[in-house]
Amino acid sequence: MSLKRSAVSNSGPLIHLAKVGLLELINIYDTVIPLEVKYEVVDRGKEKGVIDAFLVEKAIEEGWIKIINVSIDDKFVKTAEVAGLHKAEIAVIHYAYKNSITALLDDDAARVFARSLGVRVRGTLGLLIEGLKEGLISYSEAVKGLDDLSKIMYLSSDVYRLVLRKIERWK
């Protein structure tokens, strides 16, 4: 039995994966989310009536996503805010940094900031590729997932082609 790696997720990967029916890919990691992320995804999402909010809430209830409270010192917050980050992103990066775990982030500024601290970063597309490599989804599910994701999140044609090439290696 192999031990799962740990990760802390921001809103983007949860929302994107839920919207395309691939939220189970979050199980590649033992995943936690800060209260701020739960508020953004579940509480605000349910207010808007979006289905992904209910799917993430169900994953929390079933225990495959755990909620954590993150205490952050003011200096870290101020530095992250100067970099243009929001409350939830700051909590995710701080927790990943302090606990030496992967941060699941899609936003470019957040990814750059996290990497500058030595934090390992994975995004929605990385989870898609990892899910394929680990046999959680098939080749055709990965291609469909990429196509579906391209409809709900911005992917440049270069990024789309790069991910498609990586997926095709597992055909």
Image (cartoon, rainbow, N blue to C red):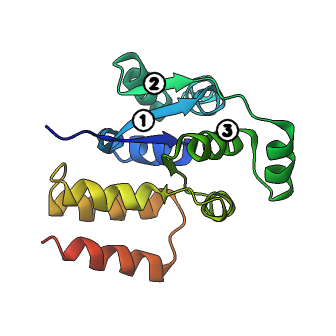
Q: Give the quarter of the image for residue 40.
A: top right
Q: Which residue is label 2 attached to?
A: 66
How far apart in space, not on screen, are marks 3 and 2 (Cα)? 14 Å
Image check: 52 left or right of 64? right
Q: Amino acid at mark 3?
A: Ala
Query: In x, y percent, where is residue 59?
Result: 38, 25
Query: In x, y percent, where is residue 106?
Result: 55, 57
Residue 50 visible in rendering = no
Seen at 35% across and 64% down, the residue is: 147
Image check: 145 left or right of 76? left
Q: Which residue is label 1 attached to?
A: 31
Q: Secondary structure at mark 1?
A: strand
How far apart in space, not on screen, are marks 3 and 1 (Cα)? 14 Å
Q: Amino acid at mark 2?
A: Lys
How far apart in space, not on screen, are marks 1 and 2 (Cα)? 6 Å
Task: Count neighbours of disc 3 (C-alpha within 10 A) and say few if under 14, some if 14 to 19, many if 20 or more.
Answer: many
How many numbered marks appear?
3
Query: In x, y percent, where is residue 39?
Result: 64, 26
Q: Nearer the viewer, residue 160 or 74?
A: 74
Seen at 67% across and 45% down, the residue is: 89
Q: Which residue is label 3 attached to?
A: 91
Name which of mark 3 and mark 2 comes first in the sequence.
2
Which quadrant would the N terminus be assigned to in this image? top left
Q: Is residue 93 above or below residue 138?
A: above
Residue 28 visible in rendering = yes
Q: Nearer the viewer, residue 38 or 93?
A: 93
Q: Amino acid at mark 1?
A: Thr
Whether label 1 touches label 2, CB < 8 Å: yes
